[in-house]
Image: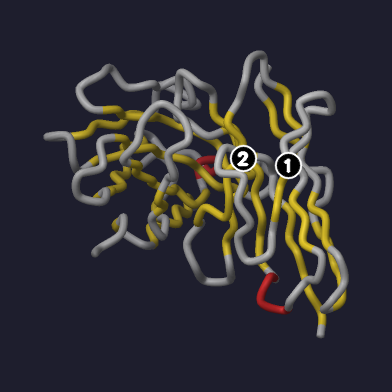
Amino acid sequence: AQRVTQPEKLLSVFKGAPVELKCNYSYSGSPELFWYVQYSRQRLQLLLRHISRESIKGFTADLNKGETSFHLKKPFAQEEDSAMYYCALSGLNTDKLIFGTGTRLQVFP
Amino acid sequence: GAGVSQSPSNKVTEKGKDVELRCDPISGHTALYWYRQSLGQGLEFLIYFQGNSAPDKSGLPSDRFSAERTGGSVSTLTIQRTQQEDSAVYLCASSLIPRGGGEQFFGPGTRLTVL
């Protein structure tokens, strides 16, 4: 079965602390993995995707096929990073996204 | 340019009534998706339109739900005989590049409340 698991509903850190939002997936095949973010009163938007291997707003995510994980990391959290983060996957033959339940990141000053 | 738009932004209805939710995708985007965001369930895929291909309806929760896309642009999601468990935010998204890796652009959503 296709599934995305985000074990933490809420992650609270202080400004400047490292952040890791966990994401594990279950998929038979080679999925495409994404992180989407929803800031307060804004639309859901793409943060990064594993095929791009890029760093966006200081965030990076590495696909670990052995551990079926795609954790999102940032070495120094900022207050403006406070948002809801969703991990998602799609398959090679379909673009529909399977989302995790999301993790709310709170960064305190 | 304009992003994905959805209407209405809020809809309150009584149990048993039918509702129609509208989505205007970004011009030129060939793929259109509907998702549902509800408390405790996260974001669930509902239906996916890609060009002239038959839609992927695998996420529709019951036969009370249907959607159409006219002229390859505007889409309408219809929920018949609404139930309280249909209360959720319904999100529409569109993308330009099919077959994986394409960024999906989301609308602001329609918040549906079934009393």
- Left or right: residue A89 versus residue B3 is right
Question: For mark 2, what is the residue?
Answer: A50
Q: Residue at x 55, y 43 (%)?
A: A52
Residue A23 x, y percent position in the rendering: 76, 41
- Left or right: residue B102 versus residue B68 is right
Among the two numbered marks 1 and 2 on one chain, the one whose residue lies closer to the N terminus: 2
Above or below for A24 versus A2 = below
Judged from the image, the secondary structure of the residue bearing numbered disc 2 is loop
Mark pair 1, 2: CA separation: 7 Å
Q: Nearer the viewer, residue B28 or A12?
A: B28
Q: Residue at x 72, y 36 (%)?
A: A63
Question: For mark 1, what is the residue?
Answer: A62
* Quadrant location, the N terminus of chain A: top right
Pointers 1 and 2 within a single chain: yes
Marks 1,2: beta carbons within 8 A: yes
Q: Chain of mark 1?
A: A
Q: Residue at x 58, y 31 (%)?
A: A32
Residue A41 x, y percent position in the rendering: 52, 71
Judged from the image, the secondary structure of the residue bearing numbered disc 1 is loop
Type of colouring? secondary structure
Rate crowding at label 1 as few (under 14), some (14 to 19) or many (20 or more) other CA atoms within 10 Å: some
Amino acid at pointer 1: Asp
Q: Residue at x 80, y 46 (%)?
A: A22
Which residue in the rendered view is the most extreme toward the bottom? A109
Which residue in the rendered view is the most extreme toward the left? B71
